[in-house]
Image: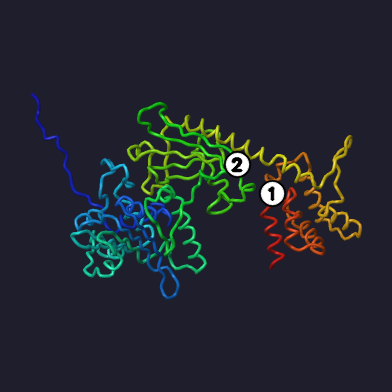
Amino acid sequence: MTLQTDSSPAVIEAPPRAAALSESLRGMGYTLGTSVADIVDNSIAAGASRIDVRIERNVEGAAERVLVIDNGRGMTREELVRAMSLGSISPNEARRSDDLGRFGLGLKTASFAQCRRLTVASKTAEGLSAFTWDLDRLSECDAWELIEESDTKSFADLIAGPTGTVVLWMKLDRALAPTSAPELAAACTRLAMHLRLVFHRFLEEGDFTLTFNGRTLTAWDPFFSKHPAKPRDFPEVTWPERATKPKVRLRAFVLPDPELSKQPVTLFGPTDELDLQGFFIYRGKRLIHCGGWLNLKDLKKSPDFKLARIRVDFENTDDFEWRIDIRKSMATPPRALRDWLRLHAVRTRTVAAESLASEHRTERRQAATQFWRKERGSVPMPDMSDPVLAVLFERLGDRTLEPAELEGFLEILAASHPSQAGRAAFINPSEEVLVALRAIARSLSKNYATETVREMLQSREPFRSWKTMLDTLFNEENA
């Protein structure tokens, strides 16, 4: 006899606590740049042609409010309530090809990462509605109480056209928490740079106008794709090869050498030469990941590859394969793609290194041998007629040369020897070199202007490869 039992499990509702979850959502790892970019994504998805980002200060000069204002299609009251809800859309739902969202969390998590009060106001033909999440209120009542704003006049003034949306951050307590004026200025500068890079393809193609604190932002193309001095243009390739609808498009670039073109290939600072070499991953036209070699086997960052950058495009239908994170700032290539990516990375790195070496081989050899002369049948000898090196012999002659200076001069001679051509950039100069440099600058300044002294040093190896040390020296001179 078979016993019949009800196999349905017992279930109970276990909703997340508002106070705890809302605070936990603040720890998703957003930076100011990734937070603002996530809000801009929503404006793009809404079809905006104008997007305005503002950081407003109070009377003390501290950041008080952040606003992102667009003229997109806007949301009705019901749509806005849904957009303000956590998990407003399932990540498994199909998205339009131009939709930059995925998890239904970005608006909230990006905002909570920077502020404790988020208000969104949106206008359509049906009217204007505004709702607020206040984390302090959630902490007190421990309930998901979404505040509907009754006074919307200030938002109506911000949305000039028939439709549009305003995202407002207040109670700023993270990246824009009370800081000094220089720190706030630096944060604003870096944010503007981040937006110019992340959305550069939209800006290049005129999809919308993006302003920041009243200034129109221009695209920063990391590939210098239209620069005439690029050593080589690679054709675009696709994966799978010869597929009717390829899943990935790739194009490699070798940048123009900034020492020859006199145009920097950096955006955020000198570390970009290492940080921005490698892969740039785009989802649609939106930059997801910039720089690095994706942990591909045996591919490490090096000054030799500073001119190598590779653009990779995929569509939002492949989000799960690329393991896009909520912040849309990281992507991991599918395993089936890694060997193909590595093949193109190796080819690009090889061309970049060869280009850099060939462009500078003669120039570097000449710069490295300026302190040395070699006559046929003899070994290289220090050239005492060189005005920089003459300082050593001058101080030897009048017996004023200090031991630390001598050590510095010997290191300079060793690093500038013809056998070391092109290697000075990989040598970390000692403090004794700076001591010798100070003596050289003092002596040369008796006969030459400061700028002339600097040019004399910059034209010779190893000093041309030791820019940071030269900057230290001449900053001391100007202090």
Question: Relative to 231, does residue 1 appear above or below in the rendering?
Answer: above
Identify which amino acid the numbered label 2 is placed on: Ser
**Would you say 96 lies left or right of 392 here?**
left
Per the rendering, the mark at residue 465 is 1
Quick one: SS at disc 2? loop
Which residue position is annotated with label 2? 302
The location of residue 232, given as percent across then percent down, is 56, 37
Q: Residue furthest bottom?
A: 59
Residue sitting at x 57%, y 47% = 273
The location of residue 315, given as percent across then percent down, is 36, 39
Q: Is residue 138 visible?
A: no
Front residue (pair 47, 390): 47
Work out how far the residue at label 1 is from the one at label 2, CA to CA, in angstroms: 15 Å
The disc, 1 or 2, on the residue closer to the chain's N-terminal end is: 2
Residue sitting at x 81%, y 52% = 409
Identify which amino acid the numbered label 1 is placed on: Ser
Residue sitting at x 58%, y 51% = 264
